[in-house]
Amino acid sequence: MTSAADTKTTELAGAPRPSAPLRLLSLGLVAAGVLLSLPALFSDGGRAQFAHGYLMGFTFVWGIALGSLFWVVLHHLTHARWSVVVRRVMEMLAEPVWLAGLFFIPLALMVVLNARFHLYEWADPGIVAGDALLQGKRPYLNTPFFILRGLVFFGLWIGFARFFVRGSLSQDNGGAGAGATLRMRSLSPAFMLVFAVTVTFAGIDWLMSLSPRWFSTIFGVYVFGGIILTSLAAVTVATVGLLRTGRISARAVTPDHLYNLGAFLFAFTIFWAYIAFSQYMLIWYGNMPEESFYMVRRLEDGWLKISLALAAMRLFIPFFVLLSRRAKRNATVLFWVSLLILAGQLLDLYWLIMPEALPGGPTFGWRGV
């Protein structure tokens, strides 16, 4: 049966929607980005940097949407009651996973036209022909299979998102009741299994294969930690913003709810740092050329500063700020820490992606943005 906490969801009157000015601002920024990017498409170097920058933006948006869906399902799976009043915010951010699916189409086109965009080495027949290692990986790393996997991933994610978001919204109509809650709880374990497998392979396909001669068995967990932390930060920013504008009542989202969000932010900050350090430590300790070159490249030619900034933004600052119980109950502190975590995710993606396009060192031009 549905609990009192479950029925309380209806007090929020559906998932919050962005205001009209915010939507116009977002569309304006997208249009400006497209116009500014057009000149880059007329040079080989510009196209390559544009493609890597697009991949960075795509994975950022995808991570927030899919990570938010993870939080929605996790709370169904654990029968969590405290999160009912913030679950609609999670659903609001999870619903646009279909939009990330649309953004995958240009990425797929750039892979098909890899000779012009130079995004993935494994998609260049000339490079593959002269590299025995890439030839051995060709049954997996090839353009048709890459696109097919992406379509399957998004088909599964979009299907789950529609099921859970529509199931939750159906309770507002008064006709679904406990049945919808039980159906969502029963499907939650299946989603978690699908999520674990698809996120791992998506991380390998889109990010790790940028350097196809390198491999890391912990990379999928690293991607998981990043999108879970980032999506929770986005949920926190949205929740505080809705509180500040009065679109969610302060009686519904209390300091106790903020504390729980802050505690999860603190926990997954540590989790992400643990996975990141484990990956680095094992590569450093093993000291094998086929593994270490990946980290060496990111500790030279200006990338060391990026690495240190990443450690500060994703670990040290959030860790020490969120140690305080008072900070975790403070909406303003959580808002700014969450923004820092979101910025840290962008920097992390820059650190993962752009060294392949900028071997001479980092630059922060408008093409990358």
Image (cartoon, rainbow, N blue to C red):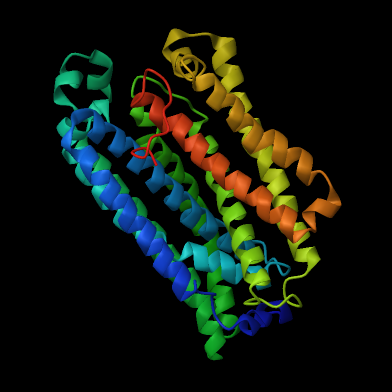
**Residue furthest to the bottom:** 174
The answer to whether residue 141 shows anywhere in this view is no
Q: Position of residue 136 (x, y in %)?
A: 26, 21
Q: Position of residue 23 (x, y in %)?
A: 43, 69
The foreground one among 28 and 234 is: 28
The N terminus appears in which quarter of the rendering? bottom right
Identified at 36% across, 24% down, the residue is 358
Residue 67 vs 270, above or below: the answer is: below
The C terminus appears in which quarter of the rendering? top left
Identified at 76% across, 78% down, the residue is 251
The foreground one among 293 and 203 is: 293
Q: Position of residue 216 (x, y in %)?
A: 47, 25
> Dividing the picture into quarters, in which one does residue 127 lie?
top left
Judged left or right of residue 305, residue 291 is left
Residue 129 vs 243, above or below: the answer is: above
Report the number of discs. Answer: 0
The foreground one among 210 and 2 is: 210
Judged left or right of residue 47, residue 263 is right
Judged left or right of residue 74, residue 216 is left
Q: Position of residue 220 (x, y in %)?
A: 49, 36
Residue 233 vs 20, above or below: the answer is: above
Residue 68 vs 149, above or below: the answer is: below
The answer to whether residue 318 shows anywhere in this view is yes
